[in-house]
Amino acid sequence: MKSAVIGQLLPPESSLPRGTGVQSAPVPAEHPSARRQFPGVPSLVVREALLTRLEHASSARLVALVAPAGSGKSTLLAQWQSIVSGRRPVACLTLSDDTCEPAGFFLALHRALREALPVASSAAVGACDSPCACPASQAEALDWLAAQVGAAAQAVTIVLDGFDAIDDPLLLRMVDHLVQHGPQQVRWMVASRCMPGFPVSRLQLQDQCVVIGANDLGFSAAEIGELGVRLTGQTWSDTDIAFILKSTDGWCGGVKFAIQSTDKASADGEPLARFNGSHHRVAQYFGDEVFDRQPGEVRRFLTATSVVDRLSGALCNALLGISHGDALIDRMVRAQLFVQPLDHHRRWYRYNPLFLDYLRDRLQRENAEMIARLHLAASRWFDAEGLPQDALPHAFAAQHRPWCLQVMARCAVAWTNDGQPLEVLRWCAQLTQDEILAHGDICCAHILSLMMSHRMTEACAVLRLATERAERVDGGAPSQASEVDRYRLRVLGRLINGEPFGEQEADVIGPRGEGKPEEFFAGILVVARTSTLLRCNQFDAARRMAMRAREIGHRCASAYLVSHAETLICAADFQQGNLKSAALACERNYAALRSGPRSPAWVNAAVTLACLRYERGRLADARALLAEVLPHVTLTSTLWVFSAAYIVLARLKALEHKPGEAVQLLDYAHSVLEDAGHPRYLAEICFEKVRLNLDQNDLVRATATADEFSLADRARHGEWWSVRRYDESWGRYGFATALLSMQQGDCEAARTMLEVLRESAEDAGRVARRASFDMALAMCHWQAGHEKTAFEVLNQTLAPSQQLSFSRTIFDEVPRFSTFLRAAINSGKLRHIPRSRHFNEWLGLVPGASASLASGLSAGRIMARPLPVAAVVPAREPLTERELEILGLLAKGMCNKAISRCSGITLNTIKWHLRNVFTKLDASNRTGAVARGRELRLID
């Protein structure tokens, strides 16, 4: 689809030759300017966006196309000229050596204007065909141009291609004067490989100058695909197009070279992955058109600075031993030598990727002996500037091992503080084992990174070797390991072995020095102590300890430690039922990191916030945040973060009626956590899979999941028959077993287990877990037919005296709990409606309730009357006549065999109809189906 502007400008399609994009169109005789084209410029891709921009900019005095060689400037001008030909006069002039001084320039411009304008308009200046008529000053040039265009009725556009060829100071001043002070009907378009040799800032401030640069002229992905089809006749994959775009920055010449280099019909066709700046066609073009045209100083500068991925004036000074690096960079930017600024303040720059490949290849071939020295200089400069992570690659490239270890130690500490174990492991892979063990900072960071990546076996092996080395005595002399290193190794050993940390040990905090741990490892110790307190259900103490860890994180500038501590504070608040406090901690943590990089600290904060948004009923917000964070959740995230992200997303998928996707998410998390071997999080996955399958009435899969974790055997051995100290692994496995027993009809066993779990959770102060068990107990009594007891338990749980912040989990963890709760409301048995907007949204009652009911719900008043029928949620599908008949018999207390005899239907068919009834009524058993049927007034 052509834009409206392009559609108005293009001549009829019948006048355009097919297969070549926009070409020169027939032009009426009154404008012979169309006969003066840019010769030999192929046009395979119509640059619609740029043509529209040129047309919108044509009212400005000056349009400057400034970009390196091969950027498609001439091609774009040819396209634009072919579009406007016949509609306005355009004088085109391609500059060359004989038009770069005033006499030749004005003679060529005079001829171009004569072709562009009617003959009558230049009748008075026929004498200008002689070079002697050339203007000698700026004033004469102004009079000369006024005489040339004075009789023109339309605006005239003068197009100067190859303007960079002009280096005559007088001619540059004349053109500058003409552009700024020339006749109002004259517009200028200048195409140049460098910024014009006259100032354009004044016109830019007056909105009379538009500059179209290299970035604007670069091909988009769609244009690369179109060019590929035009050149090869084949459709290109998105992956190949993305590779070309990344390796060329969209530079038109590079894109064409890349496509042609992979043409299988060509004799030198090769795989696209091998294409780079050293390709012979690219290298020849860069050499002839760019590199060889530069003076010796610039050539030396280009090759020497190619060792770095980004450059600044100070860095270039360090590499070349000069003092005018900034001036040289500015010179190259003005000359459009494929150099791009990386920031608005122009402190950092980079080369075009293809040009960078070419420069590095040239440096390797011509001055290979300089490469190591240049890398070492770059590494030392970055390190001195406080950028050790930029210094490290150059240190390894310089092959200076002592310097590598010094820089690696600083990087390892920084990466550990930021929670980036993969970076530590990636660079440690380039060191020998002896080098790792010999340096305390590197060794401890390596062990901790292995632990964070859940590679515990390797971490144990390295820790054992490091401990032996630290304690070894060679020839009567003790090891050189410092007391700090020994302390850190002891901390790591206890973390690996899961040994608890005492309160006294957590108090050992101080500045780094001989005999004292550095603050980050002190923070790790405090975090470990906090985790121990959480597992022991000591939530107040855990909260205080997490606050101390947060303070340490702030002191040692570790965003990861701060984020981890905030997550632990949130966990303590949530388990005690303080949902509001937990939400505040999450929002505070995320707000501090949201504008920064997508680091492990941000992942911790984002996942925790997504979980709290789910708990508070903000499902759309939770879903959006998880969609953003999930690609960043890796095995190096904490196991809690990993499991929580996948569990909450699976719950959201189930609520969207996408159980298949929910199962896939849980299966993936199961496989990952099974390899990590942590029982607590495997218990979480087990519970979620059992709960999801029961919610989908899939008893077979739920039982299979329980068997996989040997839940039936553990129940037979009485694991959940007596109260004990509550821990999450035991609690989640027990909850899954109780739900399964309830579904299988063994409500007595389920009730016993739930009461044990509830009492254990209450003793531990786990308010949120206790509330979930209370809701499950109420459901259990209801399914067993003990409605009075069920409603009593429900009302006790919802009573205002419980001081409970209602979270989504409390209701979602019990399959089909909504059926029971709605039955309680409609039967007038629910005495308390919580003062919670999220609670009411979860019920889905407010939209269908009357105004008075909505007021009562929001105010939390006692209700003892049935809800209006409009508030009752209908069945998923209407029941058939046969299903209604069977439901009525079921309500009379008949068993399946009695229903079969009464209705004359086989027993298997009865079971099949009952399954359909349960599904349509969102019921889990016979009692629930009958209650739901009465709620919907399907039966008496």
Image (tube, helix red, strand yellow):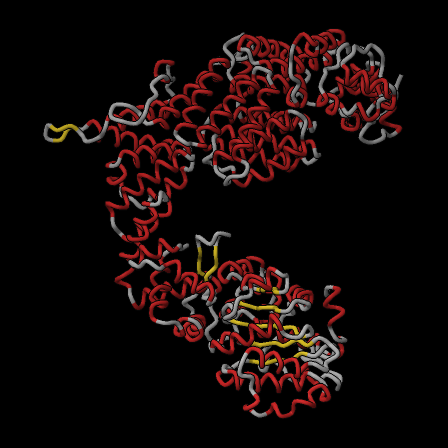
Up-down relation of residue 687 to residue 146 (above or below)? above
Up-down relation of residue 506 to residue 57 (above or below)? above
Can residue 313 be seen from the camera position used here?
yes
Residue lying at 62% horizontally and 87% vertically, measured from the top left: 111
Up-down relation of residue 835 to residue 685 (above or below)? above
From the viewer's side, name the closer residue of 332 and 170.
Answer: 170
Residue 627: quadrant of the picture: top right
Which quadrant: the N terminus?
bottom right
Whole-percent x, y for residue 427 in the image: 35, 44
Residue lying at 42% horizontally and 37% vertically, measured from the top left: 420
Instruction: Determine the residue located farthest toward the front in the rendered image.
Output: 139
Q: How many numbered discs sit on the rendered protein? A: 0
Residue 552: quadrant of the picture: top left
From the viewer's side, name the closer residue of 134 and 358.
Answer: 134
Question: Horizontally, is 165 left or right of 450 in the view?
Answer: right
Can residue 263 be seen from the camera position used here?
no
Residue lying at 56% horizontally and 17% vertically, measured from the top left: 575
Question: Horizontally, is 645 left or right of 29 in the view?
Answer: left
Whole-percent x, y for residue 687 in the image: 58, 24
Whole-percent x, y for residue 3 in the image: 73, 64
Residue lying at 39% horizontally and 61% vertically, measured from the top left: 327
Which quadrant: the C terminus?
top right
Up-down relation of residue 311 to residue 42 (above or below)? above
Whole-percent x, y for residue 752 in the image: 61, 9
